[in-house]
């Protein structure tokens, strides 16, 4: 016996990826519905060998459906997620709307699977920010061994994290650089993204940090440990898919780089590729379409007593969004719903 599943925002990058991953991982689906806004009504989506037509989110009745994956923005989620939840459907939300709600669990299954059991307060589970998800997967096994005091992270985030229009902007600007008179002005981003990097993701806050940087701090504390200090600089780079992070970690206890490498090799969801030679590391191009969070460049930081540096790369549309959401559903099924 399987589940009745709904994918909300099925025509977007993350929604389509959710459908792919549900099929790839053979999630026990008895029936599936794909929903979109009225402007996308009737758009076709693929689910395995099936072709599904989108239904109207505005009029959909969630009664009798088990799980709804929400891959729409916070405004639509704010309207429709409580409706689905009130009709008995467990919402797994990819937006930022509920991540900081104390009554909504924020879950990365390799890190805090037990947190899914708190879903019943609102019938909602939150999916973390893409940049946070891959980082905490890497931090968790190291934290268990040596206790992390402080994390300094610089991100190199792909344009797919902003959406299809951003991917189009990078493509069109890149082409326009080589065709005189066809230059493309910035529209999605405040500055040119082609052949450039932009140290600005989400809105600026009063302290000078951006909302993306604040998310990494707040979410790491909620998912992993409230005592960990985190400082982040989040940067958009001209890469289509795949987020990269340079992470500096300060521990309470000494952790040798060789032991850290062994710990990470054994940790769930992680693949270590770390050879000290040209090409002996993973780049975002190589992680696309993969489930793993890749770790490279593991080395001591000699400037502090108990320090380590690592390079962390993951497909942001997968582990950073769709894969993590499906893994939450699998964890929920195994620990709570027990169907299939």
Image: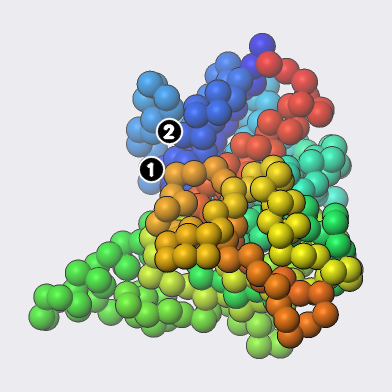
Q: Earlier in the sequence, mark 2 or mark 1?
A: 1
- As helix, strand or loop, the secondary structure at mark 2 comes to loop
Residues tagged 2 and 1 counted as in contact (Cβ below 8 A): yes
Residue 290 visible, this orientation = yes
Q: Position of residue 209 (x, y in %)?
A: 66, 82
Where is 208 relative to 285, above or below? below
> Dot 1: what SS?
helix
Q: Looking at the rendered structure, which numbered label has been put on residue 40?
A: 1
State the count of labels.
Answer: 2
Quadrant into which the C terminus falls? top right
Please report the residue visible at 64 percent of the width from the left and 16 percent of the height from the top: 2
Q: Which residue is mark 2?
A: 54
Residue 57 visible in the snapshot: no
For the N terminus, the image quarter is top right
Q: In screen coordinates, is 309 left or right of 192?
A: right
In the depicted structure, whether residue 14 falls above or below residue 21: below
């Amino acid at each position: 016996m399987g589940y009745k599943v709904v994918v909300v925002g099925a025509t977007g990058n993350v929604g389509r990826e959710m459908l792919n991953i549900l099929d790839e991982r053979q999630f026990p689906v008895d029936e599936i519905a794909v929903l979109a806004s009225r402007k996308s009504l009737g758009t076709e989506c693929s689910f395995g060998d099936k072709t599904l037509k989108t239904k109207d989110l505005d009029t959909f009745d969630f009664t009798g459906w088990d799980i709804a994956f929400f891959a729409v923005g916070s405004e639509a989620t704010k309207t429709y997620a409580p409706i689905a939840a009130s009709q008995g459907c467990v919402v797994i939300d990819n937006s930022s709307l509920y991540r900081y709600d104390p009554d909504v669990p924020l879950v990365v299954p390799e890190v805090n699977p037990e947190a899914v059991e708190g879903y019943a307060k609102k019938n909602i589970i939150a999916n973390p920010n893409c940049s946070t998800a891959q980082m905490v997967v890497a931090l968790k096994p190291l934290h268990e061994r040596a206790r992390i005091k402080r994390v300094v992270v610089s991100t190199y985030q792909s344009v797919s994290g902003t959406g299809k229009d951003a991917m189009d902007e990078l493509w069109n600007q890149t082409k326009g650089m080589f065709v005189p008179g066809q230059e493309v002005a910035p529209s999605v981003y405040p500055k040119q993204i082609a052949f450039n990097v932009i140290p600005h993701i989400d809105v600026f806050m009063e302290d000078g940090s951006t909302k993306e940087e604040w998310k990494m701090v707040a979410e790491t504390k909620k998912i992993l440990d409230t005592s960990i200090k985190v400082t982040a600089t989040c940067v958009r780079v001209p890469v289509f898919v795949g987020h990269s992070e340079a992470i500096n970690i300060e521990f309470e206890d000494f952790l040798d780089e060789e032991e850290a490498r062994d710990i990470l090799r054994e940790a769930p969801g992680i693949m270590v590729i770390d050879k000290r030679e040209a090409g002996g590391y993973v780049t975002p191009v190589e992680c696309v379409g993969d489930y793993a969070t890749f770790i490279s460049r593991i080395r001591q930081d000699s400037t502090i007593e108990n320090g380590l540096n690592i390079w962390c790369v993951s497909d942001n549309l997968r582990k950073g969004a769709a894969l993590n959401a499906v893994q939450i559903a699998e964890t929920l099924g195994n620990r709570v719903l027990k169907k299939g």
